[in-house]
Each structure stands twice: as C-alpha cells, then as structure tokens.
Amino acid sequence: MQGMSFIVKTVTRLLIGVIFLFGIYITFYGHLTPGGGFAGGIMLACGFILLTLAFGKETSLGKLSDFWASMLDNLGAFTFWLVALLGYTGGYFFINFIEKKNPFGLLSSGTILINNIAIGVKVFASVFAVFLALTIFGRFVSGLAESEEED
Amino acid sequence: MLFVFYSLLIFCIIGSIIAIEAKNILASVISAGVVGMGLSIMFLFLGAPDIAIVQVVVEIIVLIILIRSTVSIDNTSIITHQDTFAILSSLIFFGLFLVFAFMAFRGLPAFGEPLMTVSSRYLENSVQDTGASNVIMGILLDYRAYDTLGEATVIFTAILGAFMVLRVKGKKKKEEADMVKVGIPFSEELQKSAALEKEDLSDTVI
C-alpha cells in the first residue's frame, strides 16, 4: 500500500476540501481581511503536499503533474505582468484601471483582486513544484541508479 | 501584554540556541520550527495578522520539506570538533557588533513611534485611492505594486534555478542533435572510423 496509514488517509480525505476552501478564501478576500495571494497560495500548496504524503505520488501527480505545475507558475507570472502592462491604457505602469465600487465588497478594489489571484496561483504552483523537485525527483533518480546497477 | 511578549522573545532565543547546539539534525530542525511558531505569535501581538499568517504557513511548509529531506539521510547526528579560535573570533566580532548597534540605534525614535509622514498619508487615503479595506494589500498591490512584481520575479527565478539543478532528464539528446547539425562526429563513430581506416591500411599492406 502506497502512502501512509489508514488513519492518515481518512483524516486527509475529510480535511483536504476544507484546506483548499480556506486557501481560496484567503486568496480571494486578501484585500478585505488579513491574508493575500502569498499565504493563500502556500495553503493550497500545503494541501497538495498533504495529498502527496498521505496517498503517495501517483495521486497528486495525477491531479497536477510537474509539467502543469510549471505551466501554472508561468501563467501566474504572465497574468501579473499583463495587469501591469494594461495599466498603460489608463495612463501609466500599474495603474488601477478597473473602476472601484462600494468599499467593502468583493469587487471593490479593481486590479488588486486579479493580482492576488495571479500571485496565489503562481506561489501555489511554484511551491508544489519545488516540493516535487526536492523529494520525488531525487527518489526517482536513486531508483534509476539502483536499476542501472542491477543491470 | 508586555510580559507575554518578552517571555515569547526569550522562548525564541532559547529555541534558536538549541537549534544551533543540538547534535541531532532532526531535533534542530524541529526546534527551528518552534522558533518560527513563537515568531508568528509575536507578530500577532505586534498587530500584524498578515505577516503572522504567512509566517505560520511558510514555517509549516519549510518544516515538512526539511524533515522530509533529513529523514531520508540515515545518519542524522553530526560530529563536531572544538575550535577555540573560531569561537573566540566570533565572540569578539559579536561584541563589536553589539557596541556599534548600540551606538547606531540610540539615534532612532522609540519603538512604535511614527517617523514618516508618508505612512499616515497612506492610512488616511488608502480606502478612497485603492478601494481595498485591508490597507496592507492596498499598499502591496497598488501603491507599491512594482515592488511586488520584483518579489514575484525573484520567486520565478528561484523556481527556475531549482528546476534546472534538480531535474532528472539531462539535455544530452539535444546536444547530440546539435552535434549532428554542426557535423561533429561522436566518440563512438570516431572509434569506428579509426578501426575502418586500420582495416583499409591492413588491406593495402597485404
């Protein structure tokens, strides 16, 4: 059996949705409550790392492979740059070009919400990719070396 | 309140000393994590919930990755040897640092006393200017968004470097394709052609 024991798997199955929901909440409401894209992205990455540790690498890599993790990383960076460059439509670099509405609503602050989501996606994908690179790639290489020695 | 804050500070200092002095790597990793948790509670007492959340989450992830990488090492205990010169020189330089830090920090205003007029302007106008009720996000992603772009670029570059160093598949096949394009023969082919030439020579001799 891959991964950890039955207890860990059950608790993970119960908690993983709440962890993802809280990460998404922290990301989306970063301009209203404490938090923001960085903290929310790391929470999402923590959820994926929990999946990897509890169920083994096949489950988490089936949901998000290392290729798509680096793709999401690029997507977040490009969205951030795009928002920065679209500021030229309103005047200068990084101007808040979307209209601001009622002060305490979700859509109240223009580009800050988009930037938060972009940073959240970027940090989530990059931290998960680093975890994959540090743990699974190394084990994979050692397995390859063992098989070569056997040959 | 101040008593709790100072006891947390002393707790963090003791934890970091244990983290340095522990002979077992796993024990020192765990005590470094304890220091981070104490630091996050200190941030909460100082009225910075944003930094406290980030500190807690990053501390957890760093602890997981460090334990994951230290547990795979079989021998987690370190063998140390006493070096009196290093200890003595570091003590002297630390004392010098303390003296100069005391001289430098005497000129600063008291802790928590506002010095800049810019920050008060941000606090007054941030809701009208940015529309974000969380002033920190307003400063991070509207007034100082260029700074955050730099941070994002730093993270991006770090991830790129980690992937380059830790990747499994090399670029050997691509290099071979380039060599074919340029016309450089491989070492195996060179040996083969050398063997062929030898055969030709032997044919002519006979």
Image: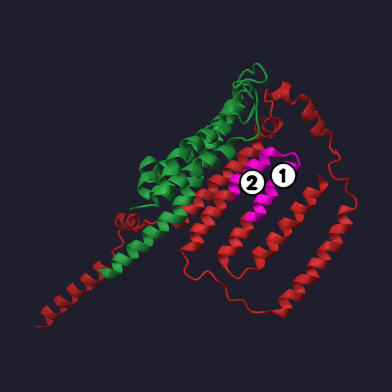
| Mark 2–mark 1 distance (CA, rounded to whole Å) | 9 Å
Q: Residue at x 47, y 55 (%)?
A: A134
Tag 1 residue: B43
Q: Mark 1 lies on which chain?
A: B
Tag 2 residue: B55
Tell me, yes or no, whether the highlighted magenta stretch contains residue B38.
yes
Q: Nearer the viewer, residue B121 or B25?
A: B25
Report how many numbered discs are placed on residues in the image.
2
Q: Is residue A81 visible?
A: no
User: Within 10 angstroms of label 1, few (less than 14), some, or many (20 or more) residues?
Assistant: some
Label 2 is placed on what type of residue? Answer: Gln
Instruction: Write down the region rendered in magenta.
Output: B34-59
Q: Which of marks 2 and 1 is nearer the N terminus?
A: 1
Q: Position of residue B55 (x, y in %)?
A: 64, 46
Asked if labels 1 and 2 touch by Cβ distance under 8 angstroms, the answer is yes
Q: What element carries label 1?
A: helix
Q: Which residue is drawn at 62% across and 17% down?
A: A99
Q: Quadrant location of the N terminus of chain B?
A: top right
